[in-house]
Amino acid sequence: MLSKIDVIKFHTLIEINALINSNYKDINSLLTRIMESATRLSGAEASSLLLMDKDKNTLSFEVALGSKGAEVQKYTVKLGEGIAGWVAQKNKSLIVNDVQNDKRHLSVIGEEINYKSKTIMAVPMRIKDDCIGVLEVINKKDDEGFTQEDIEWLEIFANQAAISIVNAKNIEEAQSKIQVLQNRIQNEYHTIITKSPVILERMEIIDRVAKTDSSVLLLGESGVGKELFAEQIHIKSARSTFPFIRVNCAAIPEGLLESELFGHVKGAFTSAIANRKGRFELADTGTIFLDEIGDLPLSLQAKILRVIQERKFEKVGSDTTVSVNVRIIAATNRDLEAQVAKGEFRQDLYYRLNVFPIDIPPLRQRPEDVAELAHFFLKNFMRETKKHFDGFSQDALETMLSHSWPGNVRELQNCIERACVIGRNKWIGKEDLFLKSGESAEVTERNLKTAINVFKTNFISKVLEENNWNQTETARALVIQRTYLSRLIKELNITPKE
C-alpha cells in the first residue's frame, strides 16, 4: 500500500505531466515548476538544473532554486568538473552524502557565494540515452542523507524535464518554420489595404475573373499597385498552388528579353553555355505576370501572341516546340489603344490581352485609402527601423490627404519610410513628410474623419467644375458610379461656387 508521501509524489508527477502535454509555452517556468517539486519531495534545501553545451563541453545553470539561486545562475562548469560535471560525463546518477570529503566536489562556487553543500544528489537528463543536462538537489533537510528511493524519484523528474526540453525544441523549430513560411508569403504576396469603394468594387471583379483562365489586362498609373492585383487574381484562382512568375518587360534589356521569356539552348549565342528555361516554361501550370507590357518590343509581340493562342513557343536557338499551360496577366501604365494606332503595339495582341481589362484608379481618386495605407506602412517601417511612433499628427494627416500623390501608393510608401527614418518626435509630423500641401479648407475639428471629408469636398468640387457640373462625366472621371457621386454631393453639401 502506498504511503501518504508516495501518493503526494504521484499526484505531483501527474500535475507536471499534464502541464507538459498542454503545450506549456514558457519552458523556463515549467522547468522551475519541475525543480520546485523535485526539491520539495526530496526534502532538499536547494536545487539546480544544468544544460549541456556540447560544442563547448560545458554545463550552464538554467534553473537554480534556493537562497543563493540567483547567484548560482551566472556560473558554468566544464564537462567532468564538479559532481554535476561528473554525472554528465559518466551519464550516471550519483548520491554524495559527505560532499566536503568527496574529491569530485567543486568547492569554488560555494565559497564565492558563501553557501556550504553537505549532501548532493545528481541525475542525468537523457534524450534517447544521450545526456543533455543534469538535475541536482542539495542538502537534505535535518542533515539526513539522500536515499536510493530519493534518487529513483529524482530520475523520474529528470525524465520529465528532458521531455519538456524536447517539446520546447520541437515547438521552437515548428515556430521557426512557420515564421519562414510567413516571411515567404509576405515577401512573395502582398496585402491589399483598402477602404475605398472603388477598390472594393475592383476586388469583387477580381473574385469573379480569378475563377476563369482568361487573360487579364491591368491598367493604371505607375505605382498604383497593379502587381498586387495580379497576385490576388493568381491567389484566388485554381492555379494558386502553382508558380506565379513575374516579368518586368521594361527592366530587361531588349537583347536579353527573348531569352528571359522563352529560354535558350546551349550555344544559341556567345554566353549561352548551358540550356536555360525561360519564364514561360517556369510558369507552366501557373500564372505569368507581364508588367509594363506596353514596353514589349514589336519583334517579341508575335511570339507572345502565339503563346496565348496556341500555348507553344521555341527557345532561342532551337527548332523544338515547347508546350505550356499558362495564364497570362499583363499590366501597363501606357495607353495601348494609342500605341496600336501608332503601329507600336500589335492590334491582335491587344485584343487577346484585353479580354478582361481592369482599371486601377490612382491614389488621389481614393482618399479613403490614404490614411489606411499610411498607418499600414508606418507599422511595417517601425518594425524595420526599430523605432516607435504613436501615429501621425493631424497636420501630417491633412497634408497627406491634400497631396495629389503623382507616384501613387509607391510614393506614399517611400514617404512613410523616409518619415520613419528621420522622425524624432512621438508623432510623425508634417515636417517629416517633405510634402507640399494642396488646396484645402480650414479644418477646425481635429480628427481624421473631418480631414478626409475636407479632401473629398475639395477634390470632388474641382472635378465637377472641370466637367461643368455634369455628374455623369464627373463620375466617369472619378471612376465611381453616378449614384455614389450623387450621394457624396448630398452628404458633403457640395454646391457650385458663385
Image (cartoon, grey):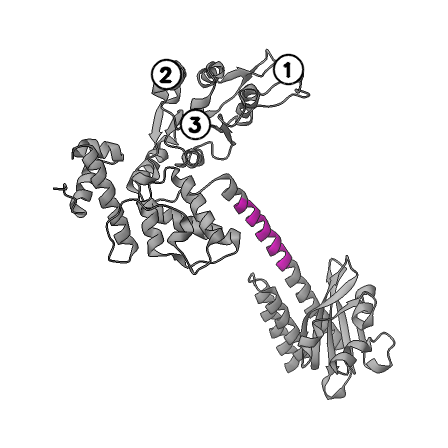
Q: Is residue 2 visible?
A: no
Q: In the current view of this chain or complex, which residue is farthest to the bottom?
A: 142
The picture places residue 443, in percent across and down from the top left corner, at: 25, 54
Q: Secondary structure at mark 3?
A: strand
Provide the major secondary structure of the magenta segment: helix
Please report the residue visible at 60 percent of the width from the left and 68 percent of the height from the top. 30
Please report the residue visible at 47 percent of the width from the left and 52 percent of the height from the top. 420
Based on the picture, tell me whether residue 142 belongs to the magenta stretch.
no
Three-letter code, disc 1: Ala
Q: Which range is magenta?
A: 167-183
The picture places residue 263, in percent across and down from the top left corner, at: 58, 21
Three-letter code, disc 3: Ile
Is residue 148 placed above or below 489 in the rendered structure? Answer: below
Mark number, residue 340:
2
Please report the residue visible at 55 percent of the width from the left and 49 percent of the height from the top. 179
Mark number, residue 329:
3
Q: In the current view of this chain or complex, which residue is farthest to the top?
A: 319
In this rendering, the label closer to the viewer, 1 or 2: 2
Viewer-proximal residue, 42 or 364?
Answer: 364
Three-letter code, disc 2: Val
* Real-space Cα separation, disc 3 to disc 1, in angstroms: 29 Å
Is residue 272 placed above or below 118 in the rendered structure? Answer: above
